[in-house]
Image: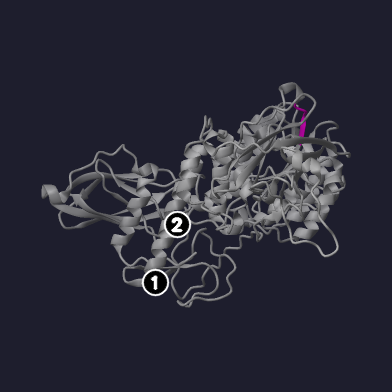
Amino acid sequence: MKRLSISSMAAAAFVALIFALFSPAGGNDRQPSPSPEVTGVQTGEIGGIVVIDTAGLPLAYANVIVEGTNLGCMTLKDGTFLVKNVPVGKYTVTVMLMGYKKEQIDSVLVFAGKTTQIEFRMREEYVGETREILVEADQKLVKIGASSAGDKDGLPGGRSEVMYFSGKKRYCPPYPSVSHNTEEYEHINDNRFLGVIANPLSTFSIDVDAASYSNMRRFVNGGEYPYKDAVRVEELINYFDYDYEEPKKGLPFSITTELSECPWNTGHRLVHIGLRGEQLDEKSVKPSNLVFLLDVSGSMDQPSKLPLLKDAFRLLVNQLGEDDRVAIVVYAGSAGLVLPSTRCSKKDKIIESLEKLSAGGSTAGGEGIRLAYETAKENFIKDGNNRIILATDGDFNVGISSSSELIEYIEKKRDDGIFLTVLGFGMGNYKDHRLEQLADKGNGNHAYIDNIMEAKKVLVNDVTATLYTIAKDVKIQVEFNPARVAEYRLIGYENRLLETEDFEDDTKDAGEIGAGHTVTALYEIVPVTDGGEASEDRLRYQDVVINSQAKRSKELLTVSIRYKEPDGEESRLISRTLKDDPVALDDSSETFRFSSAVAMFGMVLRESEHRGDSDLDSVIRLAKGAKGDDNYGYRAEFIRIVEQVKILAELREIGSKDGDD
């Protein structure tokens, strides 16, 4: 991210106005007041600061509204604000920001030619994140990212911003608000186009995780452009539910395919492949043996971590039936069993145990995982749902702490029929890649809880998909017809790719599908045109020949899927073909268009070299036209997020130009 230098309050006010136009605070509930220049009324100013009540840290990007007027602004990074040209009088001033309770001060008097100073103290509400306090130039700077080189202002490696306020130069480490940022993300190299002649088969493991989406949202809601490697495009796409046909009787999921124009690359086409897992009725839901494995180490002692974790698990407990059982294992400097396996007919006892938890100490995550598996095995329900739910920021530093050791241990334990769900919390030291790996190797799923609404989505709305596995080791292999497809590119799934031979190898681990889950994969393809054929540089010792059946066939590709029953060891195979019969984009399904919009957004965030004509305006247009019923409002929220990112991108451009000056 380029450094942002704002040299005047006027520029800040202009930026604040842009933000206000796209925020709930800038709605139509305020009546406009006449311009002071037109009426000739006397005016003054309202200035002050907004801080976080619990820590006293400045709060940036909060909306300041002078009620009954069209006047307002947004706080700067040091929490200060200044509303100019306020007509003389008495006002109510309100401050709002997602993640904080709305605060207001009544009877604020404005005098001619004077500035009335006020202060707001905001209380967190677990639906957003805070910004970092400004750090003086001689203090140690937070490193975020991985840059090893300094910059022309003498900043050490990392991503920091420079700002001028009150005539003094200050450095501002960007979001999140911690003294040392150690978040970890795996570097991702976007999948490239592959020639069909040399690479006729594309093989990968399915992925139902959606942690990348909610983590991305956390960055955006905090006013920060997401790190590229925090964006996994397939997880953005799979955050949303799609209207695929129900599975046929006897099959755990259905396969849906669609072909249309590629929205970001004229001349290319887009292949949409969708799976839907079968829903479980009440009679099919097996009793659960759950072990809550909860991180209560010192790093969890933040409002967005342990308090939110408790709220999330209270929601989950309320969803469980009387025949389900819950045990609670916690870990900090050591691991312990807080609550033996307890029937959910005693939910009060389970919730009481959650309420008593407090944070402190180092992080013996490995020991906690050992104890959790032992507890789950001791209370194993044959033909039931046996699962550990790990909730943590991923910062293990005592006992088994390396990713390789933890993964090796979990791989051994998954054969016991115990599944693993991993829920990530918090910021600043969040270990995204580690938690994703643990879930993958533990036959489970990975979600990131950034606010209480996301907790409700994962643990209430989608609880059966989160907790009940209907198929494991699910692999997809697509064979392309070289007479019709010259090249293809799988969008996302970079860390889920498999070798061709892995498809039929039942010892090779792959992804799991939960009850009612949908899984979506997109391929961008380059069609063979003008009756020609896919071509490659000829080999010296071999000739490549496309058989006559492929040339006569109208099939574009064949989708093959292998899966195992949750307690099975041998895979089963189902296949489906897709004909080369594309429809116009406007005639494609809402599912096709909305998933395409999300894919475009992911490629823009990643600054992918394959994004073609993708831009945020195109994403917004396509998504708005395919929002559909949107019962939970997730798609509308997506559109708002894209609009926020558009503003953040404009701010980066303003900062770049200002820095050049």
Spot occupied by residue 592 in the image (x, y as percentages of width and height): 59, 38
Q: How many marks?
A: 2
Q: Is residue 557 above or below residue 493?
A: above
Nearer to the camera, 391 or 362: 391
The amino acid on which the numbered mark 2 sits, given as a three-letter code, is: Ala
Residue bearing mark 1: 660
Q: Tell me which corner region of the image, top left, top right, bottom left or bottom right, holds residue 431.
A: bottom right
Q: Quick check: can you spot residue 306?
A: no
| Residues in magenta, as a range | 285-289
Residue found at the very far left of the displayed protein = 40
Numbered badge on residue 196? none
Neighbourhood count class around disc 1 (C-alpha, 10 Å): few under 14, some 14–19, many 20 upward:
few
Q: Residue at x 70, y 29 (%)?
A: 346
Q: Quadrant of the C terminus?
A: bottom left
The amino acid on which the numbered mark 1 sits, given as a three-letter code, is: Asp
Q: Residue at x 54, y 45 (%)?
A: 263
Nearer to the camera, 353 or 302: 302
Spot occupied by residue 349 in the image (x, y as percentages of width and height): 68, 34
Q: Main secondary structure of the magenta part?
A: loop
Nearer to the camera, 463 or 581: 581
Sequence-first tag of 1 and 2: 2
Q: Is residue 555 left or right of residue 16?
A: right
The color scheme shown is one colour
Q: Residue at x 71, y 50 (%)?
A: 533
Please say whether residue 573 is one of the residues in the magenta stretch.
no
Numbered badge on residue 649? 2
Q: Residue at x 58, y 52 (%)?
A: 426
Q: Tell me which corner region of the image, top left, top right, bottom left or bottom right, holds residue 514.
A: top right
Please say whether residue 286 is one of the residues in the magenta stretch.
yes
